[in-house]
Structure formats: structure tokens, C-alpha cells
């Protein structure tokens, strides 16, 4: 029981600290111009695309076949598309505190949370097999989750949220990693297949967010090439983080 709780706590800490460190950027964004916000939104899109390209899909392929990965991506995309429609029709989805970017923030938060769950499974199953492996995974995952925190705070700041509240939301997005770690310890070796399916599913959600929300929002904010260059920079940054850690 003690091992289960300590592993859950380590997974929770890795998730919260990882996205939280990226969320710290919220305290440095004050009265930004629309061109700057367009660039940061493009940067977030590039980062999320790189995470899918260099981390989620390759790892899913290491576990499952092409059909499983394709189905996972398709289901993740369909879920986010449905949630997009649902949020748009909901009364709170039409609230316009700033420019009405709360829907984008909610979708990103869901995508990040869905991504954090299989990573938590990896930490938990790693601990079940070999405790040192679980600790190593927790450290690495916390480090490369920082860009996801950056992706989350951008639309929150655009929608008029305070730096502190934007930061709190990035912390909450890390909570599912603790749940994943808990499940990983409980199901042990069976977690491997579930990790593969979950990674592909999370990849689909993030692709929808990048191409369906962030890139259009970036162009809406500022029609120039700023968001394009920042998206490429974000892709390079995300690639470096995935390969470095």
C-alpha cells in the first residue's frame, strides 16, 4: 500500500511540476500585443505538433501496429472534434472575457491531461518492474512536459485570466499523471498495451488542437507570417526537448 501511494505521489508531482514550470511563463506576459500573442500561439502549435511527431506516435508504434496507432489517432481526433462542438454550443463556451479563447484553453487542457495519463501509466508500471526506472521516467517526463504548460497558458492569458489563475490551470492539467501512475502500479504488465493505445489517442487530440484551434487562432490574431515562423521555432524546440530528454 505504501509503495502504491508513494508511486502515485511521484507521478502526480512529475505531472504538476512539469506543466507548472511551463506555466510560470504566465507571470512574464503582461499587456502583450496581438502580434506577440499570434507568435506565442503559433509557438504552442509547433511544440504540440513536435510532441506528437517525435514522442507520442513513435512510442505508440513501439507497442502496437499501424492499425492500432491509426485508430487511436482517429478516435482522439473525433473526440476532440465532438468536444469542440459541445463546448461551442454550451453557454459558458460562448463567454467572452477577452477575445473568447476559453474554448481553446479547455481543449488544450484536455489534450494535455489525456497525454499525461499514459505517461503516468509508464511511471507506475516502471516502478512495478524496477523502482529506479520509475524515478528516472518521472524526472524525464517532468522535464519534457514544460512546453505543454507554455501551450496552455497562451489562450488563458489571451482570454483575460490573471497570471496566477493561468498558472493554477497548468498545475491541474498534471493531475491525471498521478492517476495514471496509480493505475500503472495496479495493473503492472498489462499497462503496456494500454499505454500504446493511450499514446496514439492523445496524439490525435493534440493534432486536432494544433491544426484545428491554435493555427487558425494565430492567423486570426495577426494575419502576417509571425505565427508561421514561431510555429516552426516551436516545432524545433519541441523536437529538441523530445530528443534531449
Image: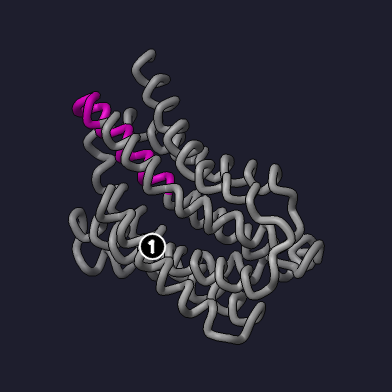
Asked if 8 appears above or below 102 in the picture, the reply is above
**Residue 130 within the magenta-colored segment of the rendering:** yes
Whole-percent x, y for residue 229 in the image: 46, 77
- Where is residue 86? Give x, y as percent: 66, 66
The secondary element bearing badge 1 is classed as helix
- What percent of the width, then of the height, locates residue 75? 42, 66
**Which residue is depicted at the point 42% across and 20% down?**
5
**From the image, which quarter does the N terminus lie in?**
top left
123 to 167, vertically: above or below: above
Q: Position of residue 29 (x, y in %)?
A: 65, 55
Q: Is residue 78 visible?
A: no
* Magenta segment: 116-133
The reply to whether residue 150 is visible in this rendering is yes
Total labels: the figure holds 1
Residue in view at x 26 percent, y 57 percent: 60
Q: Horizontal placement of 132 versus 139: left or right?
A: left
Residue situated in front as seen by the camera: 126 or 145: 145
- Residue 137, placed above or below residue 27: above
Residue at x 49% of width, y 67% of height: 43
Q: Please identify the dominant SS of the magenta region.
A: helix
Residue 56 part of the magenta-drawn span: no
Image quarter of residue 2: top left
Disc 1 designates what residue?
203
Q: How is the image coloured?
A: one colour
* Identity of the residue furthest to the top in this view: 2
Q: With 129 as the anchor, is 187 left or right in this view?
A: right
Q: Quadrant of residue 49?
A: bottom left
Relative side of 128 to 31, left or right: left
Neighbor class of circle 1 (other Cα within 10 Å; few <14, some 14-19, many 20+) is: many
Q: Is residue 183 above or below residue 208?
A: above
Amino acid at each position: 500500500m505504501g509503495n502504491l501511494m508513494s508511486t502515485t505521489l511521484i507521478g502526480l508531482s512529475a505531472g504538476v511540476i512539469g506543466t507548472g514550470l511551463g506555466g510560470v511563463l504566465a507571470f512574464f506576459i503582461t499587456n502583450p500585443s496581438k502580434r506577440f500573442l499570434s507568435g506565442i500561439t503559433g509557438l504552442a502549435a509547433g511544440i504540440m505538433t513536435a510532441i506528437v511527431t517525435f514522442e507520442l506516435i513513435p512510442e505508440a508504434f513501439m507497442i502496437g501496429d499501424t492499425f492500432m496507432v491509426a485508430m487511436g489517432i482517429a478516435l482522439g481526433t473525433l473526440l476532440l472534434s465532438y468536444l469542440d462542438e459541445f463546448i461551442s454550443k454550451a453557454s459558458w463556451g460562448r463567454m467572452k472575457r477577452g477575445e473568447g479563447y476559453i474554448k481553446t484553453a479547455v481543449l488544450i487542457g484536455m489534450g494535455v491531461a489525456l497525454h499525461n495519463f499514459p505517461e503516468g501509466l509508464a511511471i507506475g508500471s516502471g516502478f512495478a518492474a524496477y523502482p529506479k526506472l520509475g524515478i528516472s521516467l518521472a524526472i524525464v517526463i517532468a522535464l519534457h512536459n514544460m512546453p505543454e504548460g507554455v501551450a496552455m497558458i497562451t489562450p488563458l492569458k489571451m482570454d483575460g485570466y490573471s497570471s496566477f489563475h493561468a498558472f493554477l490551470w497548468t498545475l491541474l492539467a498534471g493531475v491525471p499523471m498521478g492517476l495514471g501512475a496509480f493505475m500503472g502500479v495496479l495493473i503492472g504488465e498489462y499497462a503496456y498495451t494500454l499505454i500504446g493505445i493511450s499514446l496514439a489517442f492523445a496524439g490525435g487530440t493534440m493534432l486536432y488542437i494544433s491544426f484545428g484551434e491554435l493555427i487558425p487562432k494565430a492567423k486570426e490574431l495577426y494575419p502576417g507570417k509571425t505565427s508561421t515562423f514561431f510555429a516552426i521555432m516551436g516545432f524545433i524546440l519541441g523536437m529538441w526537448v523530445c530528443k534531449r530528454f
